[in-house]
Structure formats: C-alpha cells, structure tokens
Amino acid sequence: MVWKGYRSRLHKCNDFNAYGRNDKPLRARLVELAREKPRFGYRRLHILLDRSGEHVNHKRVYRVYREAGLTVKRKTRKRLVRVGSPRPLLTAANQEWALDSAHDGMASGRAMRVLSVVDACTRECLTLEVDTSFASRRVTRTLESILAQREKPLAIRCDNGPELTSRHFLAWCIERQIELVHIQPGKPQHNGHVESFHARLRDECLNVSWFENL
C-alpha cells in the first residue's frame, strides 16, 4: 500500500512517470531537438536520440513528446477524384527528370526562387539552384552542370513557364535529343514527383528559415 501511494504521488508530478522515472531530462532533450528540427515527428526525434547515444524506449519518447506539446500539426489534404494521364513506367535512373521552381521571400522583402531537378525514378534531387529569377539560359546552364556528372535523361517533364517554353530551351532539348514533356496547364499533379519534393522542402526548410540574403 505504501508503494502504491508513492507511485500515485509520483504520477501526479509532471517530472515523474508511473514507474518512478524522472522524465524531466528527456523532455528537455526533446524540446532542444524539436527547436533544431521543428518539423520532425517523434519517430525522427527518437532516431536522433539513438544517434547521440541516448537509448530510450520509443513508447516513452512518444508519451513525453505528446506531454510536452511537441506534436507536429499536419495539413489536411483535400481528397479529389481526378482522372490521371498515363505515365511511362520508369525502371531506371535518368529515364525522366522532373523540373520546377519554388518561390519564397528573403528578410529584405525581395523574392527568390529555388530551381529543383529531381530524377523521377530514384527520387534523387540532382540540384538546388537559388536566385531571384531564372531565365532560360540560366536553366540550361544548370542542366549542363548536371550532365557533366551523369548521363543525359531520355525526357524532361516541366510546366509551361516562359523560361521552359522559350526558343532557346526548346532548341537546347532538340540539340541534345532530350524529349520535352510539358504538363497540362493548371495541372501541377502531372509533375507530382517534383511537387512532392517541393512540399517537403517548403515544410522543413523554407517555412522554418529566415533568409537574410541569397
């Protein structure tokens, strides 16, 4: 009876769990990691704890994580029924690259763009270029730097931006015998691989960072 009452008093204290273990150091450590990685859930924070030599049961990490109010708010996605266009079956790298740019702003109020090229099969990000704008010649220079390190793709999938429909960009693709696939206007889901990458890039980097300059 004495032990039962002791456990009851400990359970009422925020720093101790039902088994008498002090959760205060673990809570402080999770808060510290969450400040460094504000978009990491408890599973990824648990991995960081393991890497630092702090081996804690994942159930305990989840409990303390929730008690500390660190739960990441997830965006609710609209479930829309769409008839998708047929996509080629990709079985190897460099069959198709997906190209697009994300927009953000700097502390000065000036806009900036992040140009991404993603291998649609391996989901590897081949480059991230940052600038205030991207003309067609800047886009082709970026692609040339990738081609200097790996084989050319069979096709490039992109939207209908002016830099991607210019004569220079069309001629560049024809000269290198790369098929250019423009998605249907107003249908970003047709370039889903790079759009998915940009969603994670914005969630974990752009939305939680404050850039003073390029």
Image: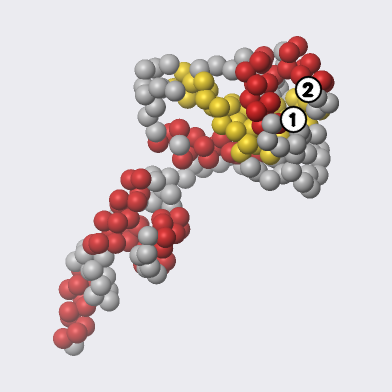
Kindly state the secondary structure of the residue where label 1 is placed.
Answer: strand
Residue 37 locus on image (x, y percent)? 39, 46
The residue most toward the bottom is 1
Q: Is residue 101 left or right of residue 46?
A: right
Neighbours of disc 2 within 10 Å: few (<14), some (14-19), many (20+): some
Identity, as a three-letter code, of the amino acid under mark 1? Ile
Look at the picture and state if 79 lies above or below 165: below
Identity, as a three-letter code, of the amino acid under mark 2? Cys
Q: Nearer the viewer, mark 1 or mark 2?
A: 2
- Residue bearing the label numbered 2: 173
Of the 4 image quadrants, the one containing the N terminus is bottom left
Residue 47 locus on image (x, y percent)? 44, 59
Q: Quadrant of residue 79?
A: top right
Residue at 35% x, 49% y is 34
Q: Quadrant of residue 20?
A: bottom left
- Residue bearing the label numbered 1: 156
Residue at 78% x, 22% y is 173
Query: Which of pointers 1 and 2 lies earlier in the amino acid sequence?
Result: 1
Kindly state the secondary structure of the residue where label 2 is placed.
Answer: helix
Of the 4 image quadrants, the one containing the C terminus is top left
Residue at 76% x, 33% y is 152
Give yes or no for contact between labels 1 and 2 (Cβ–Cβ under 8 Å): yes
Q: Is residue 9 left or right of residue 205?
A: left
The residue most toward the front is 148
Residue at 58% x, 27% y is 115
One can see residue 181 in this view:
yes
